[in-house]
Image (cartoon, rainbow, N blue to C red):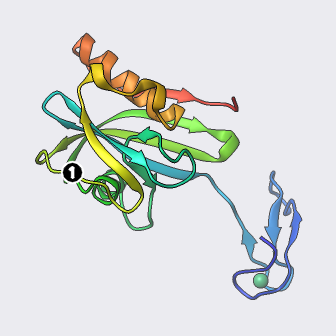
Amino acid sequence: MNFCSQCGAPLTRRVPPGDTHPRDVCDHCGTIHYENPKVVVGCLPLWENQLLLCRRGIEPRVGFWTLPAGFMENDETTAQGAARETLEEACAQVEIGALQALVNIPHINQVHLFYRGQLQSAAHGAGEESLETALFQETDIPWDDLAFRSVRFAMECYYADLRRGTFQVHTLDLGPL
Ligand SMILES: [Zn+2]
């Protein structure tokens, strides 16, 4: 950020008094522009024994398969965000259930949350950001063509819990490859 979004004056990068991190500070109006991690919310949309995946139509990782997920918006809960992303990316109505996985990715300043979700019907289709959508049995999942490590983790946790017969929240901290 180069200019203050409040008053338009140039910004200085420095540690404000009493703070611990460098911030973009406006010496004109006094605003400190804090930057904090972004929350990505998504779900594992389930229909009978199948999982709904989307093939990405946008970068990054265009052409690879993913769970419906995206940046949380203001004025929504994480579960509402996960349902909204499922509707936008997979044109599917889902009832969000319990949290399956939480993934910290500090080097890109993101936290990813994945819920289990119950599809309200088998209807689905490619939204704006998807090339195609499909329901997969576990044995048919394109494990080698998944878009993101967090998505893989959430899916692996889900199937491991399913086999064990008990579900819990799994957490993972990811670093650079
Ligand atoms: Zn300012």
Displayed quadrant of residue 16: bottom right
Instruction: Answer left or right for 2 relative to 63.
Output: right
Q: What residue is rendered at 53% in x and 27% in y?
A: 172
| Vertical position of residue 66 compared to residue 29: above or below | above
* Residue found at the far top of this picture: 164
- The residue that appears at 82% across and 77% down in the rendered structure is 26
Residue nearer the viewer, 119 or 65: 65
Image quarter for ligand 1 equals: bottom right
Report helix, strand or loop for mark 1: loop
Residue 145, position in %: x, y?
Answer: 47, 31
Q: Position of residue 56 (x, y in %)?
A: 44, 48
Q: Quadrant of the N terminus?
A: bottom right
* Image position of 41 (left or right of 17): left
Cβ at disc 1 under 8 Å from ligand 1:
no
Q: Amino acid at mark 1?
A: His
Residue at image mark 1: 124
In the displayed structure, 34 sits above or below 56; it is below
Q: Position of residue 133 (x, y in %)?
A: 30, 46
x and y percentages locating residue 74 in the rendered image: 44, 67
Quadrant where the C terminus is found in the figure: top right
Is disc 1 surrounded by few (<14), some (14 to 19) or many (20+) residues within 10 Å? many
27 lies left or right of 38 = right
Residue at horizontal 25%, vertical 57%?
A: 91
How many labels sit on residues? Answer: 1
Residue 131, relative to residue 151: is it above or below?
Answer: below
Front residue of 27 and 74: 74
- Reply above or below: 2 against 61: below
Residue at point 66%, 45% (across, down): 108
